[in-house]
Image (cartoon, rainbow, N blue to C red):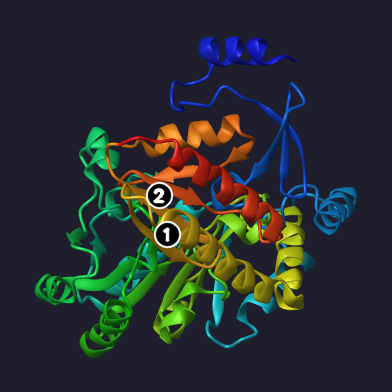
Amino acid sequence: MDLEKIKEIEKEHYMDLFRRSNICFERGEGCTLYDTAGHAYTDFFGGIAVSCLGHNDPDLVKAISDQAGRIIHTSNLYYNVPQAELTEKLTRSGMFSRVFFCNSGAEANECAIKIVRKLAYASGSGRTTILTARESFHGRTLATVTATGQEKYSAPFAPLPDGFRYVPFNDLDALRDATTPDVGAIMLECIQGEGGMIPATYDYLVGAYAFAKQKGLLLILDEVQTGTGRTGKFFCFEHYGIQPDIVTLAKGLGGGVPIACCLARGEAAEAFRPGDHGTTFGGGPLACAAANVVMDKLNGGLLDRVAEMGDYLADQLSSKLARHKFVLDIRGKGLLRGVQLDEKLSAAGVAGKMMSLGVIIGTCGHNTLRIAPPYIITRAEIDDMTDKLETIFSNTNI
């Protein structure tokens, strides 16, 4: 099917929700994507930080194919081997004692929210309110879009659920001031992805952790985008030397196959009883088989490669781009980087020019380029991408 026919079908029948680029990818190999016209593009976006093993990874393909040949779905009314294997791998470190599998980051965050509500219900404490940060992003369901500290995402869907209060990010005093007797948890991102690739400062996140412990609050870290090795450590919070009560993962966990999870420890891990929560598809054999490959590769040396390539990416971005006056900031960790531009130069426009040069990058809040390549990205591919960005910037007159 050619691109014009695809676009015609979508225009007539698909809900008007996406503003797609004028392109249709039909296959990939490593860090390269190919469109229906046969053009090649180096992927520095990874399907929004999802395709951590790149495209057509032979081990991932084999695991999915082999599992599909055995059994694809059974539901959570029965045990399945890949889920048990993945559960063991995710809890082996001892950081978390229990896990719940689902299908998306929003579902994982819903689980975290329900844990807070269940503990408040069971104790009769009334501590149902969750503090979240302005410019945060936690999902598209009604509860998680309300947890998201950006009104543009939630306002069209009022009336919204009660139980969320917003504070400025990286402002510990504001967090403390907002904590009233009804607050039961703090929910933060280590790096605000949709908010513009803004990292939590060390003092802020460590301070929030200490404050939560002091006040008996749960600390929830949304690592949907930053987790599963994206920043050079399995959890981004490891850079800060803290231990949250709940962490959520998704995106890269399945290497492209939809899977997410909510990991918990302490009282949060023991909150639910049979029937309190559930899922039909979450943690199915196919998705868990894929996630087991990702976990094995990360533990087999890929995590070290992310740290190495992340440092190289940061060095190349800084050395080639920082001199331009319209580059306001270069930030992030590992293979998750943002380049904030002056409003006079459109980040979306730059991303469009990069696509015409055969490189895919993304954008996010505050006019920021979002760079999140597969973990197998090479130095040569990083050099090519940053050279092309530098060429665009050098030919920009502002």
Q: Position of residue 15 (x, y in %)?
A: 47, 21
Secondary element at tag 1: helix
What amino acid is at disc 1?
Asn
Secondary element at tag 2: loop
- For the residue carrying disc 2, how many other residues have a C-alpha within 10 Å: few (<14), some (14-19), or many (20+)? many
251 sits left or right of 15 in the view: right
Where is mark 1, residue-wise?
109
Q: Position of residue 80 (x, y in %)?
A: 76, 64
Q: Position of residue 177 (x, y in %)?
A: 9, 74
Instruction: Look at the image and tell me in which quarter the C terminus lies.
Output: top left
Between 161 and 370, the residue placed more toward the observer is 370
Residue drawn at x 87%, y 49% as measured from the top left: 65
Where is mark 2, residue-wise?
139
Vertical side of 383 occupied by 344: above or below: above
Asked if residue 106 can be seen in this view, the reply is yes
What amino acid is at disc 2?
Gly
